[in-house]
Every structure is written in structure tokens, then in C-alpha cells.
Amino acid sequence: MRGQANDPTRLGSSPIAEAGQAVRLSLSETHALCAKAARGAGFDWGHAEAAGHAAQWLAARALPGCEILLQRLQGNAVPPRAPGLTQDPDALLCPVHLGTTLTDHAGLPELTDQTTLDLGHVAVPGLLLPFLAITAQQGARALRCCADDGTCVAFHADGTPEGDAAFPALCALARAQIHMTFLPERRPGSQPQSPERELPLVPQHIWRALDILALRSTVPSSARSVSGAGSEGSDND
Amino acid sequence: MSCEGLNPMPQASAFRRRPDEVMRLARMGCSHPTRLSFLRQLLRRMRAEGWRFDRPVWQIDEKGVGRAVYRAIGPVRTYSLVAFAHDLPPEARSDRVIATAWDATFALFDGTPDAADLDRLAANVPLQEAGRVSPRELSLSRANRSVRLFDHVVERLAEGAQPDAAMLLETGYLMRTTAVYGSGKFGAADRVAIAQRPELSAPFQAEMLSVWLTRAFTVDLVEHLARARGGERAARLAPDLKRGLGVGNSTGLGMAPFLIRHPVLLNNWMLAREEALARVRAQTGVGAAELAGFVAALDDARENAELWTSDHDIQRLRLADLRDGLARITAQVAGDWDQSTPHPWDDLWRWGCKTLPLEGQEALLAAMLEPHGTLIDGLGDCMDADEGTAFAINGAMRVAELRAILRAHYDWALGVDYTAPDQCARFWYVSEDKLEPRLGERHEEPGAERELPLDTGRRAAALWQALQGQPDDRPVAHLLLAAPRHRPAVRRAQIIARHPFAEIRDNLIHAGMLPIDILRCKLAFFGATRFDPRSDRWVRISLFQDAPYPDEMGAGA
């Protein structure tokens, strides 16, 4: 991902600044970069993919997916033992692991038998948003999540958001106590898709920090692996 | 889109091949392009919809340096190939993606570019990966001349003569691409942004359009250089010679993981092709037009097999199998094939499966599909995939059901001893320097701890082991909470339960695994011909050979 101009050593995203010191990544670049960064930071592959998915979901809605994922990867947080049940009530929960736990349990009594659930103390809770959408859709139940500062977001039973005005505020939180409430569906059917939005700018230092983490998931090429890969030889025939 | 629910021929299901027959690397490595291949779908649509083509910009100097724009104007939208031609010294040429300079660079622009767009692209496209494109671009690519042939063609045309036909046939293209990037790479438009457009909903349509227009550019360029050199005396390339030229492509390991990472997409490609074969086998007679089309397709396949050469040992053997198989099919069709039976196509197919090597069987498949456009072309609409729906795991699934899925679909993987050196000899990884997928030797090279999760069989077997002793009614969610490392395998198992052609049913880390088998399958779906491996992990191919050019699209060509 480094290299001189015209040195095509990058099959990933590029750090070329477009506006000030920021880059605009496509959604596929966001997914690839963030999944690799999460893997490089020690996530297992399944949760690294989930992290990539979450960052992409947020970026598609012009939210700072890269930034808050990096915030999570640079901080400390633990996976939950079950939805709403941590080993230590003071533990700071990883939103990606909590998110997959919620989506995995969406059809199980841990969630279906509940109308409210204390999710605990969650790091960068904005990363929960994509998983809340899936949880609502998988369980076919509308839900609302509120942070202890009063920020609330809600999703219909088909996973579409009931407005997205509070999304930026949730993404701005470094940590929060999160409380989830399942709601009787008030509005059947889907909302129309949001209009296409410009992809968010990612500050270059964020990109670099993610890139450094992503490089931890790579391996130096051995001479043997390069051999036979077609990189030697002339193209003059 | 899925084919499920769109099947107007339920009787065909009895004629479908099973996934554990189809999804083996040995057979996938014998894939041939068919009329469902992506470049064929593109050409059919453009012709059916009466697309128009022009070249509003041609600013190329006598040395072949400058820019050009080719437009494809559809009923709703216009797409433009923006081409930059460069003057590349011979010493700067090298093969594949690591090259740092190219004879020509391209972007497929969404719409008609204005002067500012062209200037922006001129500052970025020639740099390829070191530049940056925008969501207005749908692909980014580059090509190098096949120097010996390119120079020969220019020289002969400049003299008012035609190039040597044998030389043209031997190489088959004037330029070959070393990468065609789409789907959000380097800032280009994401797939999701264009997938709803009917003309781009089938896979890789933007990339195919880019390559097809690139082919026109390569011919225009040699004719332009010949005129610059020979003036009035210069000839244009004879139409029959021009037709035989495609665009070459060098491609390597980077393409192989795609089929593993996109299981739903792979399923939909395979399912469409298999449904097409089943529909043909289910036919209760052989129409005269279908017979004539089939015989013509066999003739074309035999001619192609004669022109198709390779120095690679494996491919040479396969080519021998192919030629032998095609000869036997031709003899069978002319001789013993009884067309009066209830299902004559199925009889022929069953004969082929008993008699022919895999190369011959898969060539027979392609030829059988060829005359049945009315019956099968609609299946092209089923070959894309909304992969987002496969992201969530059904955590309520019970262990008993997961076990049953593994038993039904991963039988090939569960009994393997992955501690045996051969069974785990390789590991897939991303290289630090090029960020390209590579294949390492586990027992001889460092880095296996950073292995990509492409060891699908081993992971399924590990999940199977983890399920031993678990209560049947335990939900998968509980298992994953305790053992999150099984998450990718659980997801794949749940996908394969709904999409049975989603998984390559072979050990992808085995010592004998040939990445070129994966490449050939994918490239056949693109529509590639002249598959020519240069090692077990990179190949050269040709695209659009014998296809019409833009100026021939309205002529019933």
C-alpha cells in the first residue's frame, strides 16, 4: 500500500488525498480495508468479516465507518458471554462481537422472549447499527436502542431504519450504556430507499492507521510463491 | 436474482447433474465458454436493443500516442471507453500486474466524458493502481502490445498488404490486458451502484464492455499507425482477419479466491448453466434447426481446438483429450445417435459421460447449449447475486440440522486427515508487497498463521468435529458464542444448504491442487477462449475472438 508513483504494489485502497487530507473510499475498498484491519488487530476471520460489513454499511449511509472501527480496534473491549449478559457488568463490550451475538440470537428465546434488554456498556456503539438492522429483520421485530445520553435509534421489523437522524450522534459516542426495546410494529412494509449519498471522506491518518493494521494480516512473499506466478519474464512476444 | 421460482420447465429437474459431480476441480478445470458466458450475454443484449457505437475523440499522433473515446449508446444510458495510448520503450515491458508501464490504459466512463473528465482521467488512468478514479468510472484497465504481431501488422498494412494469416492465428490478438479492475477498485463505482441497471445486472458486463471496445481500439490503432507510415498506400485490415482477433489477457492467482469468496454468485453461475443443460437434455426431440446449430457448434469447437495450443504439460494432455473427444462426438452424431428416442439429447449426453474424458464431456455441454438459445438464454438473468442476504447467520438452526447439512454437502471434506502433509501442504495468503493472493507451502515457508480462510474443506471438517457430542437441539448461536472460529464454516454451510453449487468440493490446500482449474472455470464463464496456462497458477487467454466489432453490430453479423 506504499510505493512510488506508478509502482502498482497496491491491490487495496489508495491513500491519495482528494479533499484536503482525506480520501474517499468505495464501499468495496472500505469493506476490504476494514476486514483486513480487524483481522490484523486480532479478530477471528468471522468477526473480521463482520467488522468489514459494519464499516461498509455505515459508509453507505455517509457515516464514519472507518473512523469508529479504528477507534474500536485501538481500544479495549471484550466479547459478550450472551446477549445482555456479560461476565463483568463493568466490562466494556465490543460492538462487533455484541452485534453478531444479537443477530445470531435474533430467533432464539434470549431475544424473542424479551421485550427489553440491557445490552451493557458498549464501546463505539455506532458500530452496532448494522447489526441492529439485521437483528430486527432476522427476528421480524421492530426495535429501538437508546444510549444513556438519550440518543435513540429504531428499526422496523424488516430491518429498515425508522429515520436515520440519530445515527451520527450514536456514531459520535465513544462508549455508552445501551438499552434495547422490542416494539410492536407500527408501520407495515418497507420505507423507500434513502437517496444515493456521497461516500464519506476518510481522513488520511485514519486510512493509514487501518492500513498498518491490515498489513499485519499479510505475509512477505517468498521467492517460491512468486515463482510460477507469472511475474518474471518479458511481455515482448 | 435467483433461478428459483423462475423455472418454467420443472420437468428439467430430473435431468440435472448433482453438485458433487459438477463442483470438482478436475471437471471445473475443463470448463468451456457457452452462450450463457458473460461476453455473449453482453453482445446479445446490445444487438437486441439496437445499441449504437461511435468514436467521438481520436487524438492519436503518428507515433501512436494520445487519447481516444469510444461510446456505446444504449436505449437509456451511454458508456464510454476512454483510451490513452502511450509510447512504451521495449525494455519497460513485462508481464502481468507487476508491470509499471503499459502501451495503453483505459477507463470505462459512465456517460459521455467532457473535457474536464478527460483531463482528470488523463492524470490518473495512465498511473493505474497508483492513480485514483471516481464513481463515474466503472472499470480501470491497461494493455500491452503483442509486440511481434503488432509490429508485423502495422508494417504489412503500411505497405498496402495484409499481415500473415498464420501469425495472426497463432497469437490471436494485438494487445493483451494485464488487469481489468471493476467493482469499486481504486475508487471506481461499486457494484451495488450499478447492479440495478438491466444492462449491467449480469456479472462483469462493464468489464466485458470495456474489453470489447478495447478490441476495436487495438485495430484502429494498427490501421492508424499504418496510415501514418504508409500514407495513401496503406491498407485496412481485411474483415476476415480482423474477426479472428480478440483481446488477450494474462491473469493469475488473484482471480482464484474470487470464486471461493463469492459462494452465492458461484452457485448462481453454475446453477444457470446446469439448468440450461438439464433443459436441453429434457427435450423430447431434435429439431432441424437445433441439429444444424449443434453440428455447426461442433465444427467451430473442432476448429478452435486445432488452433488452440499450449506448451503447458497439463493443458497439452487436455487438448489431446479435447480433440479426441470432439472427433468421437462428431462420429457419434453422424453415426449411432438415435434421434427418435424419447429424449435424444439426454441419450447423447449419457453416451458422452460413459465414453468421453472430462474435456470432451464439457465441450459436449457447450455445443449442446449452443442451438438452444430460446430455451436457455433467459437463464442469463439468474446469474447475478445479492450476496448481502447471505451475511447473517441463522443462529436458531439446531446442531442436528447443521450436522445434516455437513453430511449432505461436505462428504468430500469430512473424512480427510488434514494433518497429513499432502492434505494441508498449501496455505493461501495475501502478500505484503503486492497485496495479491498467493499460495504458500505450509511445511517450507513462514506465514501460515496469517492464512486466509480459503481452506474450506478443513474448516468444514473442524466444524464437524466441534459438533461431535453436542446436543442435537443446541442452537448454532450457542456454539458460535463458545467457538467463534467456526463462524465462516457455519455461514458457508448455511449458504450451501440453500445454494448447493456454492462450494468447490475439493481440498483447496492439497499439495496437488491446481489453481488454474479455478481460473479456467471462472474465465469460461467470462467467455474466454484459448486458455493457455504458463504455470499451475497463471494463464493467458483470449476474449472476443470471432465476435463482431461495433460497426458490425447492426449488420446481423
Image (spheres, coloured by chain):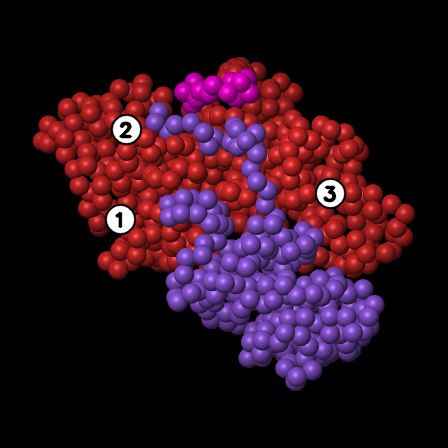
Chain colours: A purple, B red
Instruction: Say left or right for A82 vs B142.
Output: right
In the image, residue B100 lies at what x, y percent? 38, 40
Query: Is B335 situated above or below A209?
Result: above
| Residue type of the residue flagged with mark 1 | Val
- Residue B305 in the magenta stretch? The answer is yes
Residue that carries the numbered disc 1 in the rendered image: B69
Instruction: Say left or right for A83 vs A42.
Output: right
Of callouts 1 and 2, which one flags the residue occurring earlier in the amino acid sequence?
Answer: 1
Magenta stretch bounds = B304-318
| Chain letter of disc 1 in the image | B
Q: CA distance from mark 1 to mark 2?
A: 21 Å
| Residue type of the residue flagged with mark 3 | Arg
Of callouts 3 and 2, which one flags the residue occurring earlier in the amino acid sequence?
Answer: 2
Helix, strand or loop status at disc 1: strand
**Do residues under tags 1 and 2 come within 8 Å of each other at their CB atoms?**
no
The label nearer to you, 1 versus 2, is 2
Helix, strand or loop status at disc 2: helix
| Residue type of the residue flagged with mark 2 | Phe
Residue that carries the numbered disc 3 in the rendered image: B459
Of callouts 1 and 3, which one flags the residue occurring earlier in the amino acid sequence?
Answer: 1
Number of residues whose C-alpha sits closer than 10 Å to that of mark 3, classed few (under 14), some (14–19) or many (20 or more): many
- Residue A53 in the magenta stretch? The answer is no
Residue located 88% across and 50% down the image:
B470
Residue B515 or residue A13, whichever sits in front: A13
In the image, residue B30 lies at what x, y percent? 56, 28
Helix, strand or loop status at disc 3: helix
In the image, residue B216 lies at what x, y percent? 29, 39
